[in-house]
Image: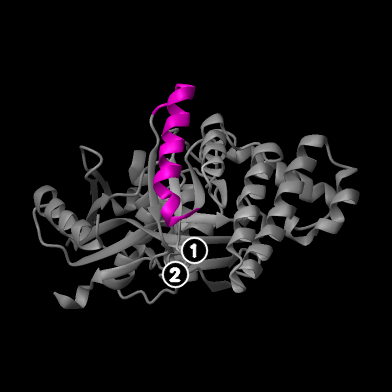
Amino acid sequence: MTVRDLIDRALRHAARTLGGKADVVARGPGRVNLIGEHTDYNSGLALPFAIGQATVVAVRERTDDLVIVCSDQFREPVRLRLDQIHPGQVPGWAAYPLGALWGLLGAGVPRDRWRGFEASFVSDVPSGAGLSSSAAIECALLVALDDLWGLGLDSAALAAAGQRGENDVAGAPTGVLDQTAVLNGRREHAVLVDARSGDVELVPLRLACAGLALAVVDTGVSHAHSTGGYAARRASCERAASQLGVTSLRELGVEDLAAASGPLRAEDARRVRHVVGENARVLETVDALSVGDLDRVGGLMTASHMSLRDDFEVSCPELDLAVEASLAAGALGARMTGGGFGGSAIALVREADLEAVETAVRSAFDRRGFGPPRVFSVQPEDGAAVVIPADSR
């Protein structure tokens, strides 16, 4: 679906459900993480990029203190007064957009700048697939409100607001990677994110020019960051850092792993080994991209998956099968992407091999008795932005 299609859908949905013309319309894309998983909350490195699949929100100001959010994926709108938007008080999916609103407090936006509004969301980012559908919602609304209210916030402040809302209101203990990628994406580029310094660097990722694409295999196994083992993995990393006397695992290099493993219990040592190795793989990937060595990039992706599977233990049989089938069909590399426990795998594939990889993955899932996966290709696209600004009214 094109951006224009999504915008038209959002405007029609807003007119139908909210009964009025939008003041501002904004787009927040999903994201794929090329490499660098479970590193962001360890002050580490990651290399995500924004994708074409996106959420579009149409927002209209109100003259009272009521906020109404609705989505084409949910039947009933959620209505709350501004003074009701607090952790523990926002129901269901609305915790993501209204959590982002609440997160603006931490960005220095006082409540007296808030105004009631109506927001209508439409999206073609698969939910629960590890493609940051939640960050797409958050960032679409944040850039819309930044424009509507004239806040003048930079991408770092908006990303922090989205993360804060997801942590405190939605209850998902995530890092800031997803929001940073969604807000800073650029076509034909990946985004090198340094979670320790907050630095963001665009890295050329011209897959199409090299005759390549990234195939996404949505396994259909839904995950949720606020449940499952995500919080346990984060706690394990924090426990290990404390025992090793470091502020975060970013302070450790590959050369430190042998000595670091001694005082740790075996499970925590495996978690540390993944994080430290993954940071190194991100830097190697950036180096390989700088010289156009995409075969090497593929190998690093596959090594990342093995580490996530064996050391961090966040994969699942469907993700492992997607990786194995993609590699067997000729992919240069493959790995799970996102927090794990379900969601999607990605495969670096020659465009000429896309159909063969899709066929191989579907056949493998059928033989194992798994539900049919959704397979599609993505390229790096632009990040979140206002598409119909408030001053165009």
Q: Residues within 10 Å of mark 2 (few under 14, many from 20)?
A: few
The region drawn magenta spans 349-371
Q: Amino acid at mark 1?
A: Thr
Q: Is residue 277 above or below residue 386?
A: above
Does residue 237 appear left or right of residue 2 in this picture? Answer: right
What residue is shown at x 28% (from left), y 64% (from top)?
Answer: 26
Task: Find numbered disc 2 in the image and state the secondary structure of the residue it sits on.
Answer: helix
Compared to residue 256, the image places residue 240 above or below, namely: above
> Would you identify the image quadrant in which residue 144 lies?
bottom left
Residue 366 painted magenta:
yes
The residue tagged with tag 1: helix, strand or loop? helix
Residue 81 higher or lower than 297, as above or below: above
Residue 294, by quadrant, is: bottom right
Q: Residue at x 52, y 60 (%)?
A: 48
Q: What label sits on residue 209 in the rendered view?
A: 2
Tell me the kind of residue under disc 2.
Cys
Q: Determine crowd level at label 1: few under 14, some 14-19, many 20+ residues with C-alpha closer than 10 A.
A: many
